[in-house]
């Protein structure tokens, strides 16, 4: 995850047409938070994000603030309301959606796969989104992204890749936790054996009965 984000951010920093917007901020923070869930120690997660961003000239604190502001501004619209905002090119939409649509319409706009994840994370806040299964929600994000002017093929590929990597990471974290738990149980059994061993050896033998 770290290597991929380093490469992604480095390439984006070299693109003249790339500008950080709410979709990018939401996508970057969503990807990092999702894949850093199993990272230990937890206190080092934010410094890690800061180092990843700083290596390519990005400000992690500013990006997280931009993401939080975008999520807050979105509120909890209905899925259909989000669709209307996009179809109306941002008319009446909150700042995150309006800014994203304005950015995409630029002639020098440069797409990042993190924007696809950002669109998905914003859509997950909409009322009714929690009733949709993950595949249906990704398909909806795919359709909305296409209506926004993003390439449907890229969106489909990037969202499916994100979901696949997220599933693999969850499985890896589960396996790691099971391994750690098994090692802990093994050490506890060994400790119990060391503790009970000397006591058993120190127990006095029964004296023979006198006939």
Image: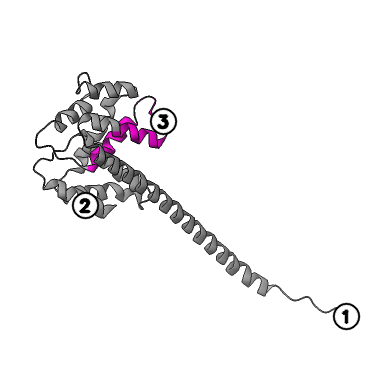
**Disc 2: which residue:** 6
Residue 210 tag number: 1
The residue lying at 39 percent from left, 37 percent from top is 135
Please rate how many residues cluster around mark 1, counting C-alpha atoms within 10 Å: few if below 14, some from 14 to 19, many from 20. few
| Residue 86 picture quarter | top left
> How far across and down, in percent of the image, does residue 52 sit?
22, 50
Quarter of the rendering occupied by the C terminus: bottom right
State the residue lying farthest toward the top.
92
Give the class, few, some or many, for how many residues have Cα within 10 Å of label 2's Cα (few <14, many ≥20): some
Is 186 located above or below residue 147 in the figure?
A: below
Residue occupying the far right of the picture: 211
Number of dots carrying numbers = 3
Magenta stretch contains residue 114: yes
Residue 174 image offset from top left, x and y in percent: 45, 51
Which secondary structure lies at badge 1? loop
Residue behind mark 3: 132
Overall secondary structure of the magenta stretch?
helix
């Amino acid at each position: 995850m770290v290597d991929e984000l380093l490469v992604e951010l480095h390439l984006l920093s070299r693109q003249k047409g790339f500008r950080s917007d709410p979709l990018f901020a939401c996508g970057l923070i969503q990807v990092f938070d999702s894949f850093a869930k199993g990272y230990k120690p937890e206190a080092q997660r934010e410094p890690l994000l800061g180092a990843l961003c700083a290596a390519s000239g990005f400000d992690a604190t500013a990006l997280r603030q931009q993401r939080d502001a975008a999520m807050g501004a979105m509120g909890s619209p209905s899925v259909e309301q989000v669709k209307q905002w996009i179809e109306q090119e941002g008319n009446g939409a909150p700042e995150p959606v309006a800014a994203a649509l304005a950015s995409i319409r630029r002639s020098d706009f440069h797409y990042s796969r993190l924007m696809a994840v950002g669109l998905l994370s914003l859509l997950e806040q909409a009322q009714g989104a929690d009733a949709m299964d993950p595949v249906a929600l990704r398909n909806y994000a795919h359709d909305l992204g296409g209506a926004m002017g993003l390439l449907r093929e890229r969106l489909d590929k990037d969202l499916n890749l994100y979901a696949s990597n997220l599933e693999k990471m969850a499985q890896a974290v589960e396996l790691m936790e099971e391994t750690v738990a098994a090692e802990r149980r093994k050490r506890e059994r060994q400790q119990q054996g060391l503790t009970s061993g000397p006591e058993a050896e120190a127990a006095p033998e029964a004296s023979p009965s006198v006939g």
